[in-house]
């Protein structure tokens, strides 16, 4: 049965989140944009307190559902819940949303690639008294989208039963907060066998406070300035054997590069979520534009044939179509995730569509505002800067096109490079 | 709750439609297009799948309930075979669905069993007018009340099967609103012109219809004496055409995909070039994105939600652009071969152009 009804618990949560977005985020948006690397502790502490009842925080994979009091099975909606939450918080301020405490992509990686014991061991820290952050480190100075070119290494010291990690990671979202501002961890992707290519890649849980791990740089960015983007250097950093996610066995068949697949599985789960954050930004921009136009007596006359519409109306209607269609792709992708359906193609579709839609919507919204669109008097110029990252992180639009194309064409990575 | 899974009945319907679309409509589409003709047996075969009949309740000769969601699923699937053939099969719906939605009890009893219980017969409707700024909410065809009758004047274009019509609904402006009027083929002042020559849809017979002082008794005003609300009809037209755009685009995507996997270029398949592969990825994404907007609009209509009207409008707006974007790229993927009529992509591109201009031609 095809249905588009927002589940009740999500609708209720959304109302509460909107209050947070309006009162705690929008009011501070400009301040934290202009004071890069300052930390919005008020928001962080509030969110930690508010979320402590519901378990892990933003971007962490959903908890299993509670049994229904009537004994009826409920369809799982954990990813959908998260998607709506992220959209609303990002509508408030995506930079601040990105510093929402919780496991983030780090916990998502543990959830996707870790054993039951590892999940138990590593994820409980997020439900403690103080806000704790998690992060994932994939990108290296010479390896961005080509994640198989990663050259951080992990060597097993058999006597100590410890892994020794070396290498440099960059663009680690919340890396500083995970390692320096809280008792969190970063999941670092490194190879246990450089000759094995992708098959040799594994995720390693690097907790805060490990000797040999240092945060060496905080990036200055075009947008999402409230969110820390860290460089992390590992020099003979040692972690216990059980901090490796996945199996020690290397399967050298490129079609079944399991370690790497686990990394990619993380992205299947999180791409639509990241796409949802972009949608929040674009919705904010579009609503702002509508309000400003209406102050000028311009309303959008839905229902007219295109030939009768003004250029602004046409643009606006097209932006609405782009926003809605991208959003629905996201909802479908996370609905599939909730129902344990393979959604790699849909996840990438939603991400590339959202990346396109939100960058174009914010670009056009600023243009329609004329000279005012360039002014920092309004948050619109900030949303323009914030939106652009949607098409870059968690797989660029081009990488996602590659993934979608492989699915549609039935091609492997070697058929279509 | 959200769900993107059609129910079992819908799946069966889509499956039957899909077989008909591929084995019958698609198989004959090129020939029909070249000859400018749709064989009656083909149209009848599509009719017998019973999609319209399943939208009409038993008391009016059908065997089901209308659902906009089911409607868009079926429309997409049929258009996936061939747009001209699909429009022909669904032409009686252009008459029956408005009667079902807003017709008076008397009109329902008079027309619905006559349509649902018979073979396919040319009941049709005319709304589109030959003006660049044609607007279904601001028609130039007028209806004026005179001596307890309506006097209708104006001109319609793209009226399918008008020459052979049993009866047709003609939409006209009455007191500033769009209203339907049921006309019979032999009404005085109703002139059916020459068959139209069009950019696409060569196989579908459509006609200009001129209305010169046609007199319509009050009882033949759609909805009876009080008339009717036009919004549900317009919404159902929009999502039907939008769904068909999805079907046409899907066929173009699949054809381009298969061709690109066969065709060699620089010692690899052309699909292995990112320039082509990325076009295909974008086409697939576009189709899936717009399909979901269409589904959502249909679902909102079934729920009677007030925003359904806007959503249907957005869906059709998206579908217009999708149809052009996807069908144009399908031709482009095939290069020179795409321009040759041995391949269907040029036909789909011509038909795809029509999505932006042909709202009103079909309804679910």
Image (cartoon, helix red, strand yellow):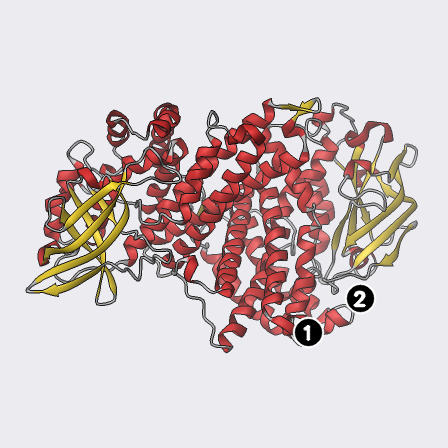
Which picture quadrant has residue B56?
top left
Q: Secondary structure at mark 2?
A: loop
A152 or B93: nearer the viewer: B93
A134 or B142: nearer the viewer: B142
- Which quadrant of the rendered structure holds the C terminus of chain A? top right
Q: Identify the residue shown where x is 79% and y is 52%.
A: A171
B4 or B276: nearer the viewer: B276
Q: Chain of mark 2?
A: A
Residue A102, horizontal then vertical, whole percent: 69, 56
Local crowd at mark 1 within 10 Å, few (<14), some, or many (≥20)?
some
Q: Earlier in the sequence, mark 1 or mark 2?
A: 2
Drawn side of residue B76 relative to residue A139, left or right: left
Q: Identify the residue shown where x is 36% and y is 47%.
A: B358
* Residue that numbered label 2 is attached to: A37
Residue A291, horizontal then vertical, whole percent: 52, 73
* Residue that numbered label 1 is attached to: A375
């Amino acid at each position: 049965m095809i249905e588009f009804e927002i589940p009740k618990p999500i609708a209720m949560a959304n109302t509460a989140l909107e209050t947070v977005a309006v009162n705690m985020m929008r009011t501070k948006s400009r301040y934290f944009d202009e004071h890069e690397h300052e930390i919005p502790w008020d928001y962080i502490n509030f969110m930690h307190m508010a979320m402590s009842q519901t378990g892990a925080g933003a971007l962490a994979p959903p908890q299993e559902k509670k049994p229904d009091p009537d004994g009826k099975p409920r369809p799982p909606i954990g990813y959908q819940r998260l998607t709506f939450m992220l959209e609303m918080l990002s509508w408030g301020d995506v930079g601040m949303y990105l510093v929402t405490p919780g496991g983030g992509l780090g916990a998502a990686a543990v959830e996707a690639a870790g054993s039951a014991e590892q999940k138990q061991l590593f994820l409980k820290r997020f439900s403690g008294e103080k806000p704790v952050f998690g992060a994932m480190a994939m990108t290296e100075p010479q390896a961005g989208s080509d994640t198989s070119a990663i050259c951080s290494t992990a060597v097993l010291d058999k006597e100590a039963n410890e892994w020794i990690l070396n290498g440099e990671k960059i663009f680690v979202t919340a890396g500083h907060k995970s390692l320096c501002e809280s008792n969190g961890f970063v999941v670092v992707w490194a190879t246990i066998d450089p000759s094995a290519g992708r098959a040799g890649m594994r995720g390693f849980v690097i907790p805060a406070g490990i000797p040999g791990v240092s945060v060496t740089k905080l990036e200055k960015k075009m947008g999402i300035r409230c969110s820390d983007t860290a460089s992390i250097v590992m020099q003979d950093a040692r972690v216990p054997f059980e901090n490796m996610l996945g199996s020690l066995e290397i399967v050298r068949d490129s079609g079944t590069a399991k370690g790497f697949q686990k990394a990619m599985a993380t992205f299947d789960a999180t791409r639509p979520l990241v796409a949802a954050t972009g949608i929040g930004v674009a919705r904010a921009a579009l609503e702002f534009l509508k309000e400003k136009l209406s102050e000028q007596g311009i309303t959008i006359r839905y229902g007219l044939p295109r030939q009768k519409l003004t250029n602004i109306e046409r643009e606006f209607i097209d932006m609405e179509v782009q926003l809605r269609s991208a959003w629905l792709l996201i909802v479908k992708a996370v609905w599939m995730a909730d129902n344990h359906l393979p959604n790699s193609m849909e996840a990438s579709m939603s991400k590339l569509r959202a990346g396109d839609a939100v960058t174009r919507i914010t670009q056009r919204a600023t243009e329609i505002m004329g000279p005012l669109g360039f002014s920092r008097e309004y948050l619109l110029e900030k949303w323009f800067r914030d939106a652009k990252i949607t098409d870059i992180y968690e797989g660029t639009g081009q990488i996602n096109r590659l993934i979608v194309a492989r699915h549609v064409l039935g091609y492997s990575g070697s058929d279509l490079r | 709750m959200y769900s993107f899974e059609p129910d079992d009945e819908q799946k069966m319907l889509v499956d039957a439609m899909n077989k008909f679309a591929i084995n019958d409509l698609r198989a004959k589409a090129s020939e029909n297009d070249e000859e400018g003709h749709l064989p009656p047996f083909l149209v009848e075969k599509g009719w017998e799948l019973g999609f319209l009949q399943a939208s009409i309740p038993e008391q009016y000769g059908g065997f089901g309930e209308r659902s906009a969601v089911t409607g868009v699923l079926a429309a997409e699937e049929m258009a996936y075979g061939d747009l001209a053939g699909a429009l022909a099969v669904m032409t009686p719906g252009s008459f029956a669905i408005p009667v079902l939605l807003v017709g008076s009890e008397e009109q329902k009893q008079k027309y619905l069993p006559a349509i649902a219980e018979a073979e396919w017969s040319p009941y049709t409707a005319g709304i589109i007018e030959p003006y660049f700024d044609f607007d279904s909410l601001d028609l130039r065809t007028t209806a004026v009340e005179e001596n307890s009758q309506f006097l209708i004047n104006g001109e319609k274009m793209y009226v399918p099967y008008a020459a052979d019509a049993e009866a047709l609904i003609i939409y006209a402006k009455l007191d500033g609103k769009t209203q339907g009027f049921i006309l019979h083929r032999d009404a005085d002042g109703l002139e059916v012109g020459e068959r139209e020559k069009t950019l696409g849809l060569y196989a579908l017979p459509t006609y200009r219809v001129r209305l010169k002082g046609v007199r319509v008794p009050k009882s033949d005003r759609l909805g009876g004496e009080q008339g009717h609300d036009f919004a549900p009809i317009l919404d159902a037209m929009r999502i039907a055409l939008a769904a068909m755009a999805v079907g046409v685009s899907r066929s173009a995507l699949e054809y381009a995909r298969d061709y690109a996997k066969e065709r060699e270029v620089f010692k690899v398949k052309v699909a292995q070039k990112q320039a082509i592969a990325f076009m295909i990825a974008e086409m697939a994404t576009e189709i899936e994105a717009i399909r979901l907007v269409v589904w959502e609009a249909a679902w909102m209509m079934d729920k009677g939600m007030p925003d359904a009207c806007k959503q249907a409008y957005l869906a059709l707006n998206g579908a217009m652009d999708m149809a052009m974007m996807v069908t144009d790229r399908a031709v482009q993927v095939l290069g020179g071969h795409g321009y040759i009529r041995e391949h269907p992509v040029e036909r789909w591109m011509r038909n795809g152009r029509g999505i932006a201009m042909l709202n009103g031609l079909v309804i679910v």
